[in-house]
Structures are given as C-alpha cells and as structure tokens.
Amino acid sequence: MIANYLPILMFVMVGLFIGVITLILGKAIGPHRPDREKTSPYECGFEAFEDSRMKFDVRFYLVAILFIIFDLEIAFLFPWAVSLDAIGLEGFLAMAIFLAILVVGFIYEWKKGALEWE
C-alpha cells in the first residue's frame, strides 16, 4: 500500500528540497543592502500617516470586486463551454443564472464609477 504513495512522497520531498535550497542560496548569495525606503512600512500604495483604522476610499473595494467578477467569469465559462453538450439544458440554465448575477455586479460597478479611471 505504501509503495503506491512512494512517487508522490518523492515528488513532495524533491519539491521541498529545491524550494529550501533556492531560498538558502538566495539569502547567502544575493545582495543585502537595506536602505530607508526598503525597510519602511508600505500599505495600500501610500505612506502610513494616520491611524490604521482610518476609512479607505470605496474604489479599493470596487476594483477588487471588478477583478473578481471578470476572473470568476472566465474561470467558470471555459469549462462550461467545453462540456456544454454533456450538461444539457439544466447546466445551461445554471450558467445563465450565474452570468445574470455577474451582470448585476458589473452594473453595480459601472454605476459606482469604478470603470472611470482617473
């Protein structure tokens, strides 16, 4: 029984070995010249100058929602299109509902102005 899992175990061990070796070599060989800019805190594209609990502009969240809408749409549309013959009308209707929900999200983004880049 354990012999069936030996190739998987070897694959994981080789992957871990290569990952650890590259990290060690990068740390040992790579240049280490920290300066003020490299060691300064960086968050959300601007210097931290106020309380960390301050409110963010809603555009940060709108851009994230926009990415998720298009990313999910493509991730689910491709396998759906490939297997459309096998899933029949029920699969088609399920995807139509899914796309309708995505369209509602897209319209929300549009109305909030997330597609207007400054």
Image: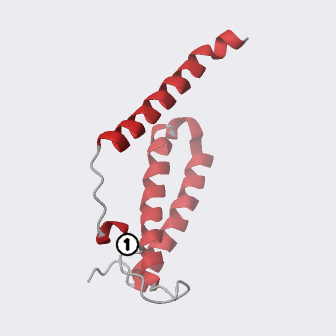
Q: Nearer the viewer, residue 62 or 17?
A: 17
Q: Nearer the viewer, residue 46 or 41?
A: 41
Q: Who's the residue at 64% across and 17% down the image?
A: 5
**How many marks can you see?**
1
Q: Who's the residue at 32% across and 66% down the image?
A: 38
Q: Quadrant of the N terminus?
A: top right
Q: Quadrant of the C terminus?
A: bottom left
Q: Who's the residue at 41% across and 40% down the image?
A: 23
Q: Secondary structure at mark 1?
A: loop
- Badge 1 crowding class, 10 Å Cα cut-off, few under 14, some 14 to 19, many 20 or more, is few
Q: Percent from the top left, x then y, of residue 104?
A: 51, 73
Amino acid at pointer 1: Ser
Q: Percent from the top left, x then y, of residue 110?
A: 40, 79
Instruction: Name the residue tied to disc 1.
Output: 40
Query: Residue 29 sits in which quadrant?
Result: top left
56 w.r.t. 5: above or below: below
Q: Who's the residue at 49% across and 24% down the image?
A: 14
Task: Give the image's coloring scheme.
Answer: secondary structure
* Residue 4 falls left or right of residue 116: right
3 w.r.t. 67: above or below: above
* Residue 102 falls left or right of residue 94: left
Q: Nearer the viewer, residue 42 or 75?
A: 42
44 w.r.t. 29: above or below: below
Q: Percent from the top left, x then y, of residue 65?
A: 48, 70
Q: Nearer the viewer, residue 94 or 38?
A: 38
